[in-house]
Amino acid sequence: MSAEGTRRPRVGVLAVQGAVSEHEAALVDVGARTSRVRVPADLDGLDGLVIPGGESTTFGLVAGESGLLDAVRLRVDQGLPVLGTCAGMIMLARGIAGGGPQPLIGGMDIVVRRNAFGRQVHSFEAPVDVSVLGDPPVRGIFIRAPWIEQVGPSVEVLAEHGGHPVAARDATRIVAAFHPELTDDRRLHRLFVEGLGGSAAGTEHEEDTVVGAQ
Ligand code: GLN
């Protein structure tokens, strides 16, 4: 590690539901420190935040009651970088197509459709070409996944499946309809962590110094 103090970014993982430990493992693999976010105070000192999948309505309900949803919205509006997967992507959308109102974090200029790939296809895998990740395609694990139905000018589509955007980013957010944390492919987490301005570069050499999640 170089002397000029490469600092490992601290990334919080919203620990309301979903694949929390899988995200933590992926983040540690790409050189981040992690901590779990359960109450608003857990957001202090974070360089980034991951919102895992799960059920967006449950998430909105639980986090709404505890005040966590408002606290996250405030920090995200202030520019805290976020990676949202599946339900996490839904939470960051500004709206939901064809659905009733439900509590969201919002802030990203996308409209998503929940459970978009059809009732009979609750879950499937498909190779997904993510433009900024190059070859090979990502192994996309879709679990009752949403797709993105509308994209505003501030948003760059990173991947499509079946003609529908399934990954995107804007200045501070990366979202995916699939679950990279359930694969060994760390490229999307690396893209996120490298964008935090911490020390993700060179993590390959630091592997042996990385300690596990708290
Ligand atoms: N179907 C879920 C929802 O609508 C998302 C599924 C997931 O996160 N794997 O919130």
Image: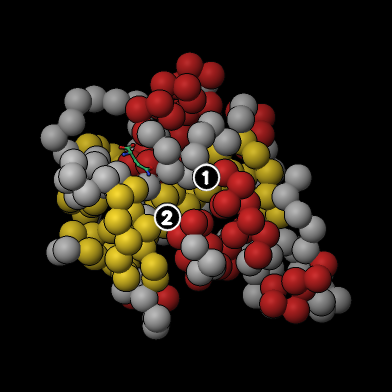
Q: Position of residue 21 (x, y in %)?
A: 61, 47
**Label ID, residue 84:** none
Image quarter for ligand 1 equals top left
Looking at the image, can residue 98 be seen? Answer: yes
Quick check: marks 2 and 1 in contact, CB under 8 Å? Answer: yes
Count of numbered badges drawn on the protein: 2
Q: Looking at this rendering, what residue extends furthest in the top direction?
A: 65
Kind of residue sitting beneath label 1: Ala
| Residue where numbered disc 1 is placed | 19
Q: Is residue 214 left or right of residue 136?
A: right
What residue lies at 43% left-to-right and 29% top-to-bottom? 59
What residue lies at 53% left-to-right and 19% top-to-bottom? 66
Looking at the image, can residue 80 be seen? Answer: no
| Residue where numbered disc 2 is placed | 179
Q: Earlier in the sequence, mark 2 or mark 1?
A: 1
Q: Quick one: quadrant of the C terminus? A: top right
SS assignment at label 2: loop
